[in-house]
Amino acid sequence: MPGRMSSIETLVGRFDPSVFDSRRRGTRIRLRVGDQSRDVVIEEDVATIEAPRGQPDAVITADEETWSRLASDPPGGWAAYRLGRLAVRRNLHVGVGFLAATSGATDPDRLRFRTVASASGKLSIMEAGSGPTILALHGLGGTKGSFLPTIAALSDRYHVIAADLPGFGDSDKPIGAPYDARFFARAGINLMDALRVDRAHLLGNSLGGRIALEMALRHPERVGRLGLLAPSLAWRRARPWAPLLRLTRPELGLVQLAPRPIVETIVHMVIPEADHGWTAAGVDEFLRAYVTPAGRAAFYAAARQIYLDEPHGEDGLWSRLGTLEPEALFVWGRRDKLVPIAFARHVADALPRARQIELDCGHVPQVERPRDTHDALAAFLSGNSDALDPAGSGSRPVTY
């Protein structure tokens, strides 16, 4: 495939190891064009082209025209990615990291990946842009990859950092850690310390929203504004399983058998369209952590703590929410099956000055409705509240 090889050789020829952080000695990326493939092997900061063999860490598939655009016009190639003409499977960190490292971009604001040594262990981040800092925190079972649309949308005016939480993605997965909101909030502050970021806006989806709230409640001086996307909040109803869950050890996940086909079947039942676009990549990200013992233990521990999160009392979320100092925007999905939009009413009672909007989406607004979500976030973060509900945006304020 001489023409196709020429495009791949162009990409590999401009590989920039300072942009790519694989956290492994050898990384294999399979590039597919139709029924033909080539592997790119990255070892000791050198990328070489080989014939396909073994199991790759990531697979990137595109048509010949898209590979040519990536070689000659990287921004055009990224447009094809957003339109679904280029797919990244298996390991999103490796696949997107390779594309970023071969884009030819040299400006310091370009998309880049690295591992940060912090007091909470090694944490994997991707970042782009300059200006005020935004720290984005993903949901349970997710990774920093779920904020790729956010980096694309906001990095022209902000320094956007998306992090893998401890226990997830490419970050360290300490056995026996509590994986509760306080633990994650401490990790977020430790990451900011390691990056020498004194103050940042926080974006959080699902569990990440709960962590962002905890960071703001405990360290308001470090937080600018809060963008909370379908945040996971403490249950207000009775929790009949709480006593049993307190006795159950999440470390049992270390020995659980979790064959990938079984896990895939379960995930496809939960997400019926798991073969399409972002959803498919998200499933891959979940699976690659879950099929490891430490990843399962972290997932179970974090899920357990979501259920056990105290709603009331001295340290209860709802008891403290009214003391929240940073301004907050809550974004809810009308079709969210995990965090019901009914939580909006409780937020209004506890924190009446918070802004709230709803979108026609499910649990991951920044992926499902990227334009509406990021238009709202951009308006809110800039202090332009009047622009939160632009005509025809598909969003609307929450009403009661």
Image (cartoon, grey):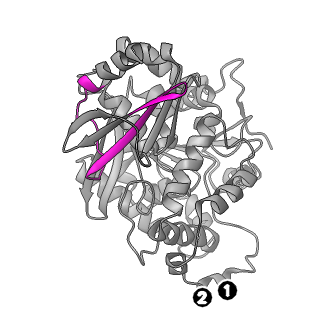
Give the percent coordinates (x, y) of residue 159.
Answer: 34, 33
- Are the two marked residues, 1 and 2, in contact with CB atoms closer than 8 angstroms? yes
Give the percent coordinates (x, y) of residue 52.
Answer: 40, 38
Quadrant containing the N terminus is top left
The residue sitting at 76% across, 41% down in the picture is: 334
261 in magenta? no
The image quarter containing residue 4 is: top left
Q: Is residue 318 left or right of residue 218?
A: right
Foreground residue, 331 or 10? 10
Q: Which residues are magenta?
A: 12-38
Q: Please say whether residue 159 is visible from this viewpoint.
A: no
Q: Is residue 108 left or right of residue 385?
A: left
The image shows residue 260, relative to residue 105, as above or below, that is: below
Foreground residue, 243 or 44? 44
Mark 1 sits on what residue?
A: 244
14 in magenta? yes
Foreground residue, 234 or 173? 173
The image shows residue 66, relative to residue 109, as above or below, that is: above
Quadrant containing the C terminus is top right
Give the percent coordinates (x, y) of residue 32.
Answer: 48, 29
Label 2: which secondary element: helix
Give the percent coordinates (x, y) of residue 87.
Answer: 53, 31
The image shows residue 27, relative to residue 158, as above or below, that is: below
Residue 247, numbered circle: 2
Q: Amino acid at mark 2?
A: Leu
Q: Amino acid at mark 1?
A: Leu
